[in-house]
Amino acid sequence: MPSAPSPAIGPFSGILVIDLTRVLAGPFCTMMLAELGARVIKVENPDGGDDSRQFTPNFQGQSAYFQSLNRGKESIALDLKADADRTVFLEMARRGDVLVENYRPGTLERLGLGYAKLKEINPRLIYAAVSGFGHSGPWSKKPAYDLIVQAMGGLMSVTGLAGGAPTKAGTSIGDLTGGMFTLVGVAAALYHRERTGEGMMVDVAMLDGQLAILESAVMRYAATGQVPGPIGNRHPSITPFEAYDCADRPIIIAAGNDTLFGKLCQALGMPQLPADKRFSDNTRRTQHAAALKGILEAVLKTDAAARWLTVVEAAGVPCALINTVADAVEHPQVQARNMIVEAGGLRMAGNPVKMSAFSDPPTRQPAPALNADGERIRREFLPK
């Protein structure tokens, strides 16, 4: 049984994070640090703050986009070119454990606030930078957005229907993977510091993240010399493993090995199918995926998806409906895992990292208004 929740709010309780991030990749990382117990102080431009504060739709007068990525943080507005505000910021950096920024490489260095400078005043500081192309290489100074790295990293070329145009993922996966890899880097750097006392710079490129999540596409290209392309909902190496039409709507069936394929065939009333040489093992099924799909759909189209889900699930074969966002949000499994929480009255995705030593409450502190904590933070960090 999981142990009782600790009085601390998370494993990073006591860690001070200086958050110089905007929009998505960086704020997602720092929000997760806050979810895991860190104190996160968001440092914003006095002239409007984080760009995403202007993104619609609004909820109770504030951008829902901004709220969903900045819950649980504090906000101070600082002009880093002004001496008085720089003094406050440098004191924050001197006392901080982690600084996260997602400026274009060179921006903070021009302000005299890059890693080399901050390391002088705080050798224990973990300085994490997430950018489009990283802090090295010929493209390091170029600007980037999510769509740019999805295109450059190969992801769009393998997404979409076979024979169709290159297609972006349905979410900003270039930004989100950049934020997640930065989170991993920060956690690893904190563990290293715990053992050695040394801070470091963590350099994450969104483009690198896209290569890292290409999964089998890189392996298939390296092994065969063939350039992967889009194949719709089908798995490139496992069959049957895709969407199949029923009488009313499609379902996903994922028979990941020969045993599951045999169980599927029994459930659909075709026990003889595994004996067909075209389908006798996974390699042959994948070679003849289109023919197999036609055979399976001829049966599945005779009845509604709900019935076939019951039949296939009872056989022990993984299957699912293709949910809308509304379906996913209201799904009982999602609800049971506390994956929809409230912050400031707005429902949003919860923390997917569940830890037995810490509670996972259904509500969170809302995102702060611009400079909401500025006066208190200034008093705290004015040099004594």
Image: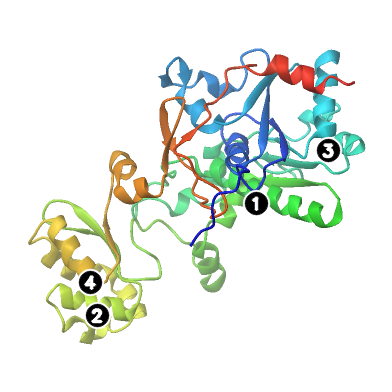
The residue where tag 4 is placed is: 292
Q: Is residue 261 above or below residue 229?
A: below
Q: Which mark is residue 115?
A: 3
Work out which residue is located at the far right of the displayed protein and give it.
120
Quadrant, the C terminus: top right
Q: Would you identify the image quadrant in which residue 109 lies? A: top right
Q: Are marks 3 and 1 in contact (CB under 8 Å)?
A: no
Q: Are marks 1 and 2 in contact (CB under 8 Å)?
A: no
The residue where tag 1 is placed is: 184
- Compute the Cα span from label 1 to label 4: 41 Å
- Compute the Cα span from label 4 to label 3: 57 Å
The residue where tag 2 is placed is: 262
Task: Name the secondary structure under disc 1.
Answer: helix
**Residue 214 point in image, percent of width and height:** 52, 57
Mark 3 or mark 4, which is nearer the start of the sequence? 3
Nearer to the camera, 322 or 125: 125
* Left or right, residue 93 beside residue 14: right
